Image (tube, grey):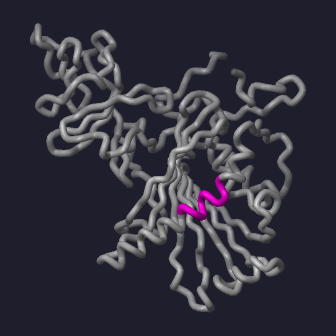
Amino acid sequence: MMRSDQRNQQTQPQKAHPVFNNWQVVTEGWYIICRSDELGLESVLSRNLNQQHLCVFRDSQGQVYAMDGYCPHMGVDLGIGKVVNDRLRCFFHHWEYGKDGQCKHIPIQDQIPKRARLQTYACQERYGFVWVHPDPNTPSEVLEVPGLAGKEVSWVHGKVYQRRCHFHITMINGIDPQHLRTVHGIDMQMDLEITQNQPQLIDIELQGQTPNKTPIEKLTRALLGPDYAYSMKYADGCVAALTTMKRVQFLGRTGIVPELNMLFAYQMLEPGKIQVQPIFLTQKRKGLWGLVLSRFWLWLTKIGFYALQGEDGQVYENIRFGTQNLLAMDAPVARYIKYINGLKPSCWSQKSDKT
């Protein structure tokens, strides 16, 4: 089946970008490979991640390690192997690999070939997931929501969903305030500020006055105050943190309504299809009442997300995104595209057909 971005090339030629909306490029960044509870002590599994077949295993101490998923001997899927003495053992000929990816044991001989090794990748566990990074020595960590950084958090996993466009496109949603009026009927004038202090990170802040025309707008303004703001932080073009309900008041009082936070983890399933994992987060609160409050705010965050998802989803199911006709008001989108094009392609990227 032809992807939408491959159509109309003669009559509506599309501008190509080195990284942005490029299905052959996988940027360096953190990607979810599985849930933490799928990987018990001394167990192994293999998964396809951004068209790269990987295996992850957990040792007897609970640490998780990731490496390429095929045995370099004859290419057997290492996910059907087992963990023995904190080594990954291939099911077929019992070659054993250490945490560094180097083969440590071959049953029929003492000498181990230099090529008997696996490429390893950095691993972290956060928010109930195992995350993998293409760079085994990356200094970065899985993105935290800025307002919750360094704090204990509670989370709920949202339902995974798919889109038929690149996730670089869906990430534009939050920095396009025009569509709040045209798609969602929210007529709000907002100021937008973009800052980028590191090549792989970009911060976006939007703020404005809550409208005061319709009955719902007037009620919202009376309950939550005249000001509204939300912010986003993108990491490596593949993880996005969103914070809403910033600086709102409740019946004229500030500090009562907490911010609502969510995280989105993206990955490519195949060219033309992506997967999105929403994660809803809030600060962890102590005691039974704290647990009830945390669950309530997580539920409210989830409801707010799903209220908008359906309307936005119609846009992204068959979009053929073009950048030739961006207007002055699209300056934030152009800035975001520049950020994506500055990201570093990883070793998981595919070679161009033209090379």
Please say if 166 is above or below 198.
above
Drawn side of residue 185 relative to residue 28, left or right: right
Residue 205 percent coordinates (x, y) = 64, 66
* Residue that appears at 55% across and 34% down: 268
> Which quadrant, please, contains the C terminus?
top right
Instruction: Tell me what residue is drawn at x 44 percent, y 29 percent.
Output: 48
Residue at image point 53% right, 58% down: 241
Q: Between 4 and 288, which is closer to the camera in this rendering?
A: 288
Q: Position of residue 101 (x, y in %)?
A: 26, 27
Side of 92 where 342 appears, left or right: right
Could you tell whether 354 is left or right of 76 in the image?
right
Q: On the rendered image, what quadrant is the N terminus found in?
A: top right
The percent coordinates of residue 22 (x first, y second) are: 64, 32
Specify the segment rendered in magenta.
302-309
* Secondary structure mostly taken by the magenta-highlighted segment of the chain: helix
Residue drawn at x 80%, y 81% is 212
Asked if residue 325 lies in the magenta stretch, the reply is: no
* Along the line of sight, the residue nearer the viewer: 71 or 353: 71
The image quadrant that residue 307 belongs to is bottom right
Q: Nearer the viewer, residue 243 or 161?
A: 161
